[in-house]
């Protein structure tokens, strides 16, 4: 019964997070076209997807607690993006610095929450570092492939 609740909550949290994140990306003036928005959102989702797959296969009895908490972490990060998203959608306040600051705050909060999730469930720290590694790759891909800020 507890697993069913955790499964439903994880699905709900990830769905809401995806919807909010898409809205966030959609209203940002830094994205030039739909494929770029889709790529950016896909990169963000892939880091969560890798962790979901890993948790499903490697965490056994703790997987649904972990996935529910991970979904909540993802949703909190997306909710932090809402002030920018609402301002950009309904007012003239659509400053790229507001966009970047929102992203930075969301990522920092998610790092803390993800760490607390790992700690709460007494998982090995490699879960946290694995997510940090995925996050670093995702940020690198965003800066190189999506925005061409960094060129190799």
Image (tube, rainbow, N blue to C red):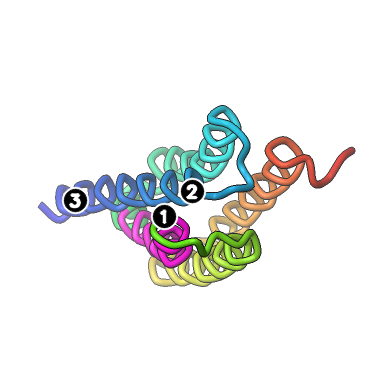
Q: Nearer the viewer, mark 3 or mark 2?
A: 2
Label 2 Cα neighbours within 10 Å, binned few <14 / some 14-19 / many ≥20:
some
- Tell me the CA gap for discs 1 and 3: 38 Å
Residue picked out by circle 2 = 27
Tag 1 or tag 2, which sits nearer the N-term? 2
Residue picked out by circle 3 = 3
Q: SS class of the residue under badge 1?
A: helix
Residue 87 x, y percent position in the rendering: 44, 63
Question: Looking at the image, which is closer to me, 141 or 37?
Answer: 37
Say which residue appears at 52% left-offset and 64% top-offset: 93
The image quarter in which residue 91 lies = bottom left
Say which residue appears at 66% left-offset and 51% top-offset: 133
Magenta extent: 68-88
Residue 118 x, y percent position in the rendering: 46, 65
Q: Is residue 80 magenta?
A: yes
Residue 64 x, y percent position in the rendering: 29, 51
- Tell me the CA gap for discs 2 and 1: 6 Å
**Figure quadrant of the C terminus:** top right
């Amino acid at each position: 019964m507890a697993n069913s609740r955790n499964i439903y909550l994880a699905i709900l949290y990830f769905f809401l997070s995806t919807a909010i994140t898409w809205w966030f990306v959609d209203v940002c003036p830094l994205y030039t076209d739909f494929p770029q928005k889709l790529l950016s959102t896909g990169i963000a989702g892939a880091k969560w997807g890798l962790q979901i797959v890993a948790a499903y296969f490697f965490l056994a009895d703790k997987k649904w607690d972990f996935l529910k908490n991970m979904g909540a972490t993802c949703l909190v990060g997306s909710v932090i993006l809402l002030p920018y998203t609402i301002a950009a959608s309904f007012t003239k306040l659509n400053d790229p610095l507001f966009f970047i600051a929102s992203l930075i705050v969301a990522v920092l909060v998610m790092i803390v929450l993800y760490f607390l999730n790992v700690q709460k469930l007494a998982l090995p720290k490699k879960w946290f570092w694995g997510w940090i590694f995925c996050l670093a790759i995702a940020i690198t891909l965003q800066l190189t492939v999506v925005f061409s800020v960094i060129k190799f």
